[in-house]
Amino acid sequence: MGEGARRRITRRVMPYLFTLYVIAFLDRVNVGYARLQMDREPWFTDQVFGLGSGIFFIGYFLLEIPGGVIAEKWSARRWIARIMISWGVVAVLMGFISSASQFYVLRFLLGLAEAGFYPGVVVYLTHWFRSEDRAKTMAMFLAAIPTSNIIGAPISGLLLGVNWFGLAGWRWLFIIEGAPAIILGFVTLFYLTDWPSQAKWLPPEGREWISAELEREKQAKQKLHSYGIWEALRHREIVLLTIGYFLIVTAGYGNGFWLPALVKRLSGLSNLEVTLITTIPSCVGLLSLQLVGWSSDRSKERRLHTAVPMLAAAAGFLLAALLQNNATLAVAMLCLVSAGVHGYQPGLWSLPASFLTGAAAAATFGMMNSFGSLGGFLGPYVVGYLFEATHRSFTAGLIFLSISALSAGCFILALRPDQVKAPLPASKAYTGD
């Protein structure tokens, strides 16, 4: 049944990609923790933070579609390595900014540098894992998002308390958390393998088995319909997926960037205590991610496993807005939000690969992540704008995020089940380890 080959591939590939995404996501969102101390800077305001947080995704938007295609056509390994080195350099430079304009420029450049990483990894996983295994695989990879918060929050809290060589803690937060990306970027060139046929660490029988399985799966999809890149990008289901993803990313990043500030306002605790409390929703999100990924692969159902978590997030945002006077209940509702904004991802990212292959699938991953990234701009900016416009209240922002998540779930429910069904299972032959 190929269990031996699958285990070897998983052990080799997934822990490393998981580590890379932990670092990537931490460098993307650590500005939310840095904000707890950056507001002492004379040039820093809530609107500067909201715009600077979101402007990352403008740069991200520009290179996402070509990034996915480059990973498919050229070398995912080299593309991922280039991205990591670039974003690590920019992340470290964030520690030396001294004005709002520098903040905007480096956040924009960070988005440009990281663009293509996520679709590149998704494309890379299609070179190694069959469709029937991808929700669990995506759940393992995407577990890096809540894990980056679980690990990064206390580290960020501790770094905010240092003042080495006359530099404030928020500066060291960017410098220290950016450096590992540069190091692992060079390691990636030697550690990852682009295709199973090149994997010397996999027995010959295993290389042949996984290559044959993936080729058989590709041929089965092409017999149903062979989509070109532009045909795939105009496909009704892909358009709905892209809109739904944009809306849930709006909600997710609006929550993620402002969560430390919201928890601080609800609790009145110290910066270190706030960073520790924010790990609680992340732990819930991590559990949700794994359970939904397991359930989706077990049932071979993707659509409802994507929509239901989005609707749960919408309920969590609304209840958090209504329960702000009770910090404990509000944080509990933010745990429900976290379960939703993490839990939808394995199902969603398995949907395009259920009926697309090759460059069409790669371009689709890029387009979805590209337009979704605009939600990463919209969410933090709108929450920041509403926060100041309503006299520093989070109520309007939370309601806006609830509407975004609810709308996302509705677009996913509009998908036609017969169009996004899982492919036929591949044959099973090799059983060696």
Image: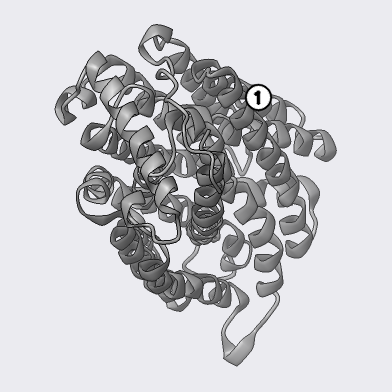
Q: Is residue 144 above or below residue 214?
A: below
Q: Which amino acid is tagged 1?
A: Leu
Q: Is residue 180 above or below residue 358?
A: below
> Is there any visible trace of residue 98 in the rendered image?
no
Task: From the top left corner, tell me how far across and down residue 111 is, in percent.
Answer: 35, 56
Quadrant of the rendered image containing residue 240: top left
> Is there any visible trace of residue 369 in the rendered image?
yes
Residue plotted at (53% across, 39% down): 431
Residue plotted at (53% across, 48% down): 10
Left or right: residue 13 versus residue 313 is left
Quadrant of the rendered image containing residue 362: top left
Task: From the top left corner, tell me how far across and down residue 263 is, in percent.
Answer: 72, 48
Task: From the top left corner, tell me how far across and down residue 217 is, in percent.
Answer: 34, 27
Which residue is more in the foreground, 165 or 200? 200
Quadrant of the rendered image containing residue 148: bottom right
* Badge 1 density bin: few <14, some 14–19, many ≥20, Cα 10 Å: many
Which residue is more in the foreground, 312 or 211? 211
